[in-house]
Image (cartoon, rainbow, N blue to C red):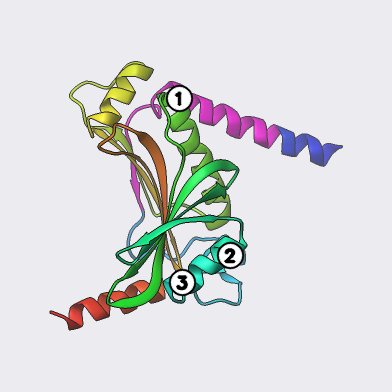
Amino acid sequence: MKIQSKVTKGITIIGLCVLAFIAGGCGGQVTERQDENTPFLGNDKEDASSSAHLEFKGVPIDGTLSEYVSKMQENGFTLIGKRDGVARLSGDFAGYRDCIVGVATLKQKDLVSKITVIFPAQDTWSSLASNYFALKEMLKAKYGRPFEVVEKFQSTYPPKDDNARMHEVRMDRCEYYTIYRTKKGNIELSIEHDRLTRSFVRLSYFDKINSAKIMKKAMDDL
């Protein structure tokens, strides 16, 4: 009973912190960054997997586009289409329904190196920020302390309410992102919008090994 009480208390505290962030627009501007020479502070259990590659849905980010798409389909995702070395799939991820997942390669080298998840679009700042901060907490629990956090509005005066914050998002004056560094690659979480005025949370995984291979291929072409 004591253990359950501590767990419940911890969950409650996290929930209250998230609500406080949302209500206060993150409580003001936040900018944090570890020094480049800071030792890796991630979760050692995450690095203990047998794969040398960063994983997405338990699948190492490696192989050809067709091979990786096939593995995502086995995980319950539906292929929308492929174009210019990128495959788009739809499915549920991290408790969110109807996400869009992009699997990216370099066209000249059919090797998967990046996975991007687009979470469902939101019409209110409270819903958008709720998605962002909930995912941020889950990522922190899995990957450890973030390498860099920037959470601020670039407007002259801080927005005071939900509508004002959403206006700043659509005007491209909302800079909210968190970067997690691991020995196998980086994970980047951010609030974004597109030309259709849709606002959403984006989560990207960059595999270190294959990103380096693709960079070398690009440099060889120069």
Label 1 close to label 2 by CB (< 8 Å): no
Tell me which secondary structure the magenta stretch mostly adopts: helix
SS assignment at label 2: helix
The residue segment tinted magenta is: 9-33
Label 2 close to label 3 by CB (< 8 Å): no
205 or 105: nearer the eye?
Answer: 105
Q: Is residue 56 above or below residue 2?
A: below
Alpha carbon distance from label 1 to label 3 = 38 Å
* Place of residue 55 in the rendered image (x, y in percent of width and height, measured from the top left): 53, 66
The residue at the far front in this view is 81
Numbered disc in front, either 2 or 3: 3
| Amino acid, disc 1 | Ser
Numbered disc in front, either 1 or 2: 1
* Place of residue 126 in the rendered image (x, y in percent of width and height, measured from the top left): 45, 24
SS assignment at label 1: helix
| Amino acid, disc 3 | Ser
The quadrant of the picture occupied by the C terminus is bottom left
The disc placed on residue 46 is: 2
| Amino acid, disc 2 | Glu
Residue located 36% across and 44% down the image: 177
Q: Is residue 162 above or below residue 139?
A: above
Mark 2 or mark 3: name the one nearer the start of the chain: 2
Does the image show residue 17?
A: yes
Residue identified by numbered label 3: 66
Alpha carbon distance from label 1 to label 2 = 31 Å
The disc placed on residue 126 is: 1
Quadrant of residue 109 in the image?
A: bottom left
